[in-house]
Each structure stands twice: as C-alpha cells, then as structure tokens.
Image: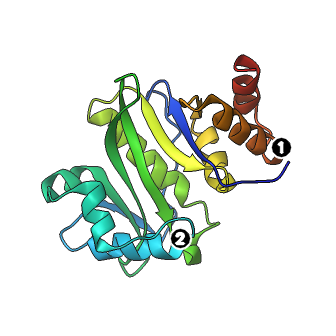
Amino acid sequence: MSSENISVSMIRATLNDLPQFAVPAPYTLRWYELGDEQAWVDIHVAADAYHTFTMATFEQEFGADRALLSTRQAYLCDETGKPIGTTSAWFYNDEEGDPYGLVHWVAIHPTAQGKGLSKPLLGLVCERLRALGHTQGYLNTSTGRLPAISLYLQFGFVPQMRRDRETTLRAWRQVSERLPHPAVEEFLRKNA
C-alpha cells in the first residue's frame, strides 16, 4: 500500500492520569509572552514541511486575544531563552458538538528534535487543558508524522473516526503498517 499524508484525528477520553516528564536541563518551559508570534511562525516554518506559516496564519489560528494566549500557548526554550518548540492548549467542538481541549500545533525546531523534548511540552499542555476545565483531549495530525503519532499514542490518545470513514480507515491502516500499536489495531477492528 502506498503511503499518503492523510489528516487524522485523535482523542483522549479523559485528561486524568497524564504521563509526567521533566524538562531536561538546560531547557525550560514557559507561557506566551507578547512578541512570541514571530517565534511561533519561525518554529513552524522550520519544523513543518506540510503547511505554510506566516504571521497571518498565527492571527487566523489564535486571534488577537493575547491574554488568552498567555494562559494557553506554551514555549520550550533553549539555554539562551530562545523558543525552540511550541504548542497550545486550545479548545474545539467536534462534529457532534462535544467539547474537547485541543492540543494545537505541536512543533519542535529540527535542531532540537530527537531529544525527548516533545514529551514535557505535550505533558504541560495536557495538564493546562485539564486545569482549564477540559475533560477530554483532541488533536489533529497526519499519517506522514509517525513520530508525532507515536508520541500521542504514548500519551493515551487514540484514533478518532472522521465523517469520511473510508479515508479515515485507509489512513489508520497505513499507520498500522508502519507503526503497529494496540490502540490502532483496536480502532481498525471496531470499525472493520
């Protein structure tokens, strides 16, 4: 089967009992500060080959409420304090109108990838979602991002059926071939 880069969704039924990961020295985590917009764009431009990112993208995704960002957008910083990773604890209502805490746009600059830094960043954002009153987690990714899917599976996120059933099943079959995991296999069995 040929591999496509298909958009997929994943959910976490509860935001309780989240895995915990310490941030390794010399890295630090912090929340959005005024002026971080360009850092967000720069990180995504470097880390994401599938999308185009500009300041307009930032505004479209997050709007102009900087106070909201200061409680929901996280940054991973290097030893100099420069942001090298980011994600947001956002919000989303699914196609049935169910509310979810959205893990939104996770990215680590390529120079810092492969160092286990996504785990503490994702853990921080999931904890923030829970602290903000969200009870379930949701995220979007794509089948071309196997390391990200592996991370999300480790955090207890599982495949979510989208309205386009055929495409969703094709996507998760592709993932299963390259990244066997019990949660993916169970999803495919239940939806066969």
Residue that label 1 marks:
177
Label 2 SS? helix
Q: How many marks?
A: 2
Q: Amino acid at mark 2?
A: Ala
Residue shown at the point (67%, 47%) measured from the top left: 150
Label 1 SS? helix
Residue shown at the point (30%, 64%) measured from the top left: 58
Residue shown at the point (54%, 52%) measured from the top left: 119
Would you identify the image quadrant in which residue 33 lies?
A: bottom left
Between disc 1 and disc 2, whose residue precedes?
2
Give the side of residue 96 with respect to residue 185, left or right: left
Residue shown at the point (63%, 49%) measured from the top left: 6
Closer-to-camera residue (114/182): 182
Q: Tag 2: Cα neighbours inside 10 Å, few (<14), some, or many (≥20)?
A: some
Q: Amino acid at mark 1?
A: Glu
Q: Is residue 68 depicted above or below 112 in this figure?
A: above
Q: Position of residue 46 (x, y in %)?
A: 51, 76
For residue 42, the mark is none
Residue that label 2 marks:
47
Q: Position of residue 103 (x, y in %)?
A: 42, 45
Q: CB under 8 Å between callouts 1 and 2?
A: no
Q: Is residue 91 depicted above or below 95 in this figure?
A: below
